[in-house]
Amino acid sequence: MRMVVRTGLALTVAATAVNPSTAQMARAPSLAQRVVILPDETAFTADVSPDGRLAATFTQPYGRGTPEAPARIEIRDLQSGGRVTLTGGVSDAGSPGRPAAVFSPDARYLAYTWLDPQLKDTGLLQVIRVEKGAEPRTLIPADPSDIGIIPHAWSPDGKRILVLIHGPSVSMDRDPTSLAWVSIADGTRHTIKTLEPWRDGGMALPRLSRDGRRIAYSAVARQGSSERAIYIIDAESGADRPIVSAQGSSSSPVWSPDDRHVVCVNRRRGSLTSDLLALDVAAPAAPPVLLEQGFVGEPVAISTNGTLYAMEFDFGWRGFVLQPAASGGTAIERFSGHGVSWLQNDRLVFGRDGARVIVRTLRSQSERSYPRAVSVMAPRVFSDGSAAVLHIWGDDGRPGGGFYRLDFASGTFTRLFSRVEGERVRSLVSALSPDNRTLFLGVTMPGSSTVTAIAIESGLERTVVDLPPSVPPVQGIAVSPDGRRLALHTSDGRILTVGVENGELREVISPSPGGGWSEVVQWSRDGLHIIYGVRASAAGTDWRLMRVRASGGVAEAFGLDSSALPTAGRLLRFEFSPSGESIALSVRQPPRFEVSATTLLLRR
């Protein structure tokens, strides 16, 4: 878990009011930030204590634990980095199911949900003292008629817990969801309100005001729609009303310390990014206020001093730049992103967050974002740095997505051609010719596969080579510096070359037990060698680069392996800089949940 503390500039509600009908929201001021690294283990943060000192985290949040690596709940000190594992029925081989936990008002107790290891997919509600060696007390035992009882808040007097009850079956889209109080004394329930199945109550994420009188939650506003609104409900009677919000879908509400505002995430229709808004509860007709544009994450809590804690799932995509390239060198740059390619000797282009193309300048570490792409594959950059060809999954609903040209100066995306045409499926990996006119990629069809060349401007396609039935589909492809030959890396680990014009196919490296990797193949700058990756372990996090003469021969170690990186990760792509001095790598590390803390100054 990583905590990002943003400091230096408070955000004032009165300064950035947003008209819900305005097409373009005002940009929030930028924030300075520093990074504090906590114990480097994947953990899901379910709650932060009211004073902002402690975090309740779940290890292995969505996977069943094992005796060797049990799923458990940890309390982590956000100031010192210390942590305490809660024991007594938590650290067995069971699973938290949907991770959920909330601190009591004094942070001395924790209420949490856990899957009963004896009853599959059936949760129980427990309370445990926040100290090492404490034993939990079960408030509501596992009941096959309920698929989940999820705690979301404590009453101010610490006598009741606000929960969501899902059930009675395992289908949240066909069954209602109820907001209810559970008594700490005896586990009895009092239903506050029941939401119809179409309102998607499973994602309501209710939050209780500090005075305990009102509940903010998110629900679908209209049947047949997917857009959500924020509602305020009386904590006893269940009477509710919606709060005016910006156009689009609003979710993940949290209360300000004075109960005057509800902060939430809003995604406008057609947008790929979300904004952080503040809604004035006392003046529901007032326009929302933009706190941060392009906000990434899900709000968890706002502490009593006005610090917003939000969590972002980090899929583990990492980029590294190493220098000197010839011997692997040392990592001189590290960043979040995937599919890294060189734009110039000091600039990189890659994907991030599944929704953006990033151009990053190394020396200044400044970045420009192009928020159009969804699940960007490695961009293929034109030799003059003006544009790139890339694959985008979100292709207006077309199956398989499509290939696009991104012009960096204007930021425009121009569609080129589809990935799927009938039974023909083009590969997600490709290579661009040195003259920027042709894209080379593999194509699979029932019972056969080929390598084709597509003219970028006209879309005309020709076959370079029909692969023999004994050769599996291409996983990686690279063009020689002179543009005359292709290097192919297949799924069984073999390396082949093929003439671009004559289709002459040669096997350079025979199949290997570890198999081939997507995109892990490149030519040396002089065109004499092919450099490729091999696995040194079954998991793929231990790897090394090899090189072999393009004309054939015995492969030898290139001089770069996984030990050159500060943390382990599976190699996904590598590419030499235009000068050959540096090498950029894309790796996949274990996913993590990152927590950010932002100071908010919410004034009336």
Image (cartoon, helix red, strand yellow):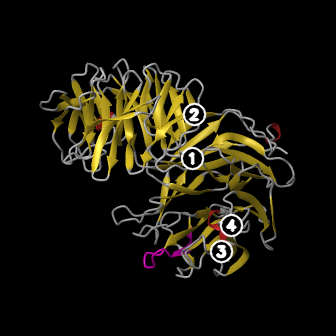
- For label 1, the crowd category at 10 Å Cα-Cα, with few meaning under 14, some 14 to 19 and many 20 or more, is few
Disc 1 residue type?
Asp
The relative height of residue 54 versus residue 546 in the rendered view (above or below) is below
Q: Is residue 601 visible?
A: no
Marks 4 and 2 sit apart, C-alpha to C-alpha, by 33 Å
The relative height of residue 571 versus residue 180 in the rendered view (above or below) is above
Please report whichever mark, 1 or 4, sits nearer to the chain's N-terminal start: 4
Q: Position of residue 290 (x, y in %)?
A: 75, 42
Residue marked by disc 3: 176
Q: Position of residue 71 (x, y in %)?
A: 43, 63
- For label 3, the crowd category at 10 Å Cα-Cα, with few meaning under 14, some 14 to 19 and many 20 or more, is many
Membership of 123 in magenta stretch: yes
In this rendering, which labeled residue sits more in front, label 1 or label 4? 1
Say the numbered circle drawn on residue 370.
2
The relative height of residue 188 versus residue 509 in the rendered view (above or below) is below
**Left or right of residue 403: residue 497:** left
Please report whichever mark, 1 or 3, sits nearer to the chain's N-terminal start: 3
Q: Give the tally of numbered discs.
A: 4
The reply to whether discs 1 and 3 touch (Cβ–Cβ < 8 Å) is no
* Viewer-nearest residue: 263 or 576: 576
Membership of 187 in magenta stretch: no
Marks 2 and 1 sit apart, C-alpha to C-alpha, by 17 Å
Dot 1: element: loop
Q: Which residues are magenta?
A: 116-128
Residue at left offset 38%, top offset 20%? 578
